[in-house]
Amino acid sequence: MNGTRGKTVVLAVMAQAVSGLTMPAMANVVATPVEIWLPGPGTAADLLVGPDTGDGQVYLAQSCNDCEGEETGNDEVETTSAEARGTGAFTLTEGNTGRIVSVLREANVTCTAGVPEEYRLDCLRNYYLALANSLPNTGDYVPVKKALREGAAKLDAIIKANVDTSAPKIRPHQGNLPDAPRTKPLRAVKKEAAKEAARQAESVIAETSLVILRAGEDPTRRTAHYAQVSQAVESNLVILRSA
């Protein structure tokens, strides 16, 4: 992932009990605009992502509230299914199904570890749209592509109806791995609307899972593969229920 377009803003969060850090040292740390490490135990408020702070390190999520020209409705993460890109046929194989399932399960980690409840819907939408866009328009997985696109659109509608325009956009690392690419900027829903928005999103996930499962019934050779993808989509419910 190449980072955000335009101006990047990093939200600096004060670490507690910082000791032995001189001002020149602090300047050197803050001079790194994308990834900031602060010594000593501390918190990163609602934007803490990455490894545990027990080792004395606090990893901060990147805030992109002032990014210029961002079209958040079209933002997407880079998925690991690069083989699926392009317009060629994407044939039914265990490897291809496994890559789709892997991306969906990665969403469970990315969208829960350190990601506040109000950002999780857009995180999941981000994954659905990116995965759908990575699948070609021909081949055995076209119904999966269509179902994920429709699911992403429905999640987007829920987010837009409850979006918190005052909240900063955040960019957690994929898979909650410090060296992994970040997602595109994620929008927050209003805190007071988060529970109801999550309830609506659960219905979208369940519907998307069922649509994919039923699409695997014809032809029947897709049944086992589509069942795996359907189960992976259903597992995304953990994103909304673990808050």
Image: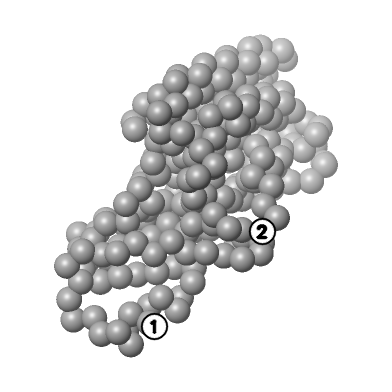
Q: Quadrant of residue 61?
A: bottom left
Vertical side of 21 occupied by 39: above or below: above
Measure the C-alpha gap from mark 1 to mark 2.
26 Å
Residue 181's label in the rendered image is none
**Quadrant including the C terminus:** top left
Q: Residue at x 41, y 33 (%)?
A: 191
In the rendered image, is residue 238 in sight?
A: yes
Residue 51 x/y as whole percent: 32, 57
Q: Residue at x 47, y 29 (%)?
A: 236
User: What sort of colour scheme is used for the picture?
Assistant: one colour
Query: Is residue 84 left or right of 240 when viewed as pictured?
Result: right
Q: Amino acid at mark 2?
A: Glu
Q: Residue at x 67, y 52 (%)?
A: 70
At label 2, counting other C-alpha atoms closer than 10 Å, the crowd grade (few under 14, some 14-19, many 20 or more) is few
In the rendered image, is residue 105 in sight?
A: no
At label 1, counting other C-alpha atoms closer than 10 Å, the crowd grade (few under 14, some 14-19, many 20 or more) is few
Q: Residue at x 33, y 80 (%)?
A: 26
Q: Earlier in the sequence, mark 1 or mark 2?
A: 1
Q: Toward the viewer: 188 or 199? A: 188
Residue 28's label in the rendered image is 1
Determine the secondary structure under disc 2. Answer: loop
Q: Amino acid at mark 1?
A: Asn
Residue 173 x/y as whole percent: 47, 54
Residue 166 x/y as whole percent: 50, 45
Vertical side of 83 occupied by 190: above or below: above
Residue at numbered disc 2: 68
